[in-house]
Amino acid sequence: MKTILHVNQHVIKSNSKNDENNPVITCKTYKTNEYGHQAIIYDKDNNEVCRIVYSKDKPLSCGAKVWLETNNRVEIINELNSF
């Protein structure tokens, strides 16, 4: 089953403007939409592969409030539509 993770920039802006802390990450499947402040992605052996983090009150030094963390190797691809 395909799963799409979406970061809602409108909620991030609204949270900042209105001093709220609504979840900004949406996990979408053909059946459900779930909302949260973090999303953890697991491999087939149930090991954590990466985590998407929303931290309104403690952003990164660059100012980012949402980021992805992983201990795995990362490859950057500079082509559009390469998957």
Image (cartoon, rainbow, N blue to C red):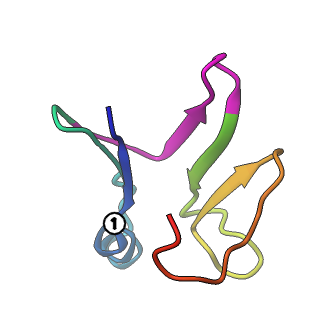
Which residue type carries mark 1? Asn
Percent x, y of residue 82 = 53, 71
Farthest-out residue, left: 31
> As rendered, which of 32 and 54 lies closer to the eye?
32
Name the residue nearer the viewer: 27 or 75: 75
- At x 67%, y 43%, the residue is 50
The residue lying toward the viewer, choosing from 23 and 49, is 49
* Residue occupied by mark 1: 8
Tell me where the magenta segment starts and ends, as one range.
Answer: 33-48
Disc 1 crowd rating (10 Å Cα; few below 14, some 14-19, many 20+) is few
Side of 40 where 23 appears, left or right: left
Dividing the picture into quadrants, the one containing residue 46 is top right
Using the rendered image of the protein, determine whether residue 30 is visible from the camera's viewpoint.
Answer: yes
> Residue drawn at (75%, 48%), measured in percent from left and top?
70
SS category of the residue bearing label 1: loop
Say if the magenta span includes residue 46: yes
- The answer to which quarter of the image holds residue 8 is bottom left
- Figure quadrant of the N terminus: top left
- Say above or below: 49 vs 8: above
Q: Is residue 27 above or below residue 69?
A: above
Does the magenta stretch mainly form a helix, a strand or a loop?
strand
Q: Residue furthest front?
A: 82
Q: Is residue 24 visible?
A: no
Q: Which of 31 and 82 is in front in this view?
A: 82
Residue occupying the point 38% across, 68% down: 19
Give the answer, above or below, for where 1 lies relative to 59.
Answer: above
- Total labels: the figure holds 1
Residue 26 among those drawn in magenta: no
